[in-house]
Image (cartoon, grey):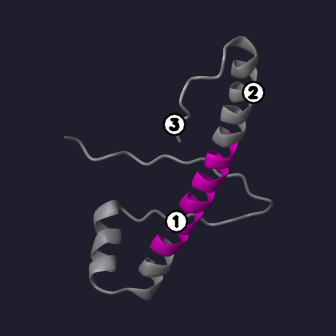
Amino acid sequence: MAEPRAVCSVTTRGSVEALYLPREAFLEKIEAGSGAAHKVAYEIGRILADRMVSTDESIAEVVVRLGVAGSDRDSGNRPFVA
């Protein structure tokens, strides 16, 4: 299986300098105990967790709306699966 390819888009408010760190080099830094690499990994995890919470909240809102609309169409005997 091929390695996953990471792609991102960034919009800045001013001039910035972007650096590229290949996956293998980043993993080597993690294994070597680099504090900076660990901080980057932690921040990526935190951002992803925040996005998952936001997505869960959005999905829950849709489920509630569909549940309310569904109860108008049928007797509401369908089980709710979370």
Q: Which residue appears at 55% of the width and 48% of the height? A: 8
| Residue 7 forms part of the magenta stretch | no
Q: Position of residue 61 (x, y in %)?
A: 72, 39
Q: Which amino acid type is shown beneath numbered disc 1?
A: Ile
Give the mark toward the camera: 1 or 3.
3
The residue where tag 2 is placed is 68
The residue where tag 3 is placed is 81
Q: Which residue appears at 38% of the width and 86% of the height? A: 34
Q: Nearer the viewer, residue 18 or 43?
A: 43
Give the mark toward the camera: 1 or 2.
2
Seen in the picture, residue 76 relative to 73 is either above or below; the reply is below
Q: CA distance from mark 3 to mark 2?
A: 15 Å
Q: What range of the chain is rendered magenta?
A: 41-58
The kind of secondary structure the magenta stretch mainly shows is: helix
Circle 1 — which element?
helix
Q: Which label was assigned to residue 20?
A: none
Marks 3,2: beta carbons within 8 A: no
How many neighbours does mark 3 have within 10 angstroms: few (below 14), some (14-19), or many (20 or more)? Answer: few
The residue where tag 1 is placed is 44
Q: Which amino acid type is shown beneath numbered disc 3?
A: Val
How many neighbours does mark 2 have within 10 angstroms: few (below 14), some (14-19), or many (20 or more)? Answer: few
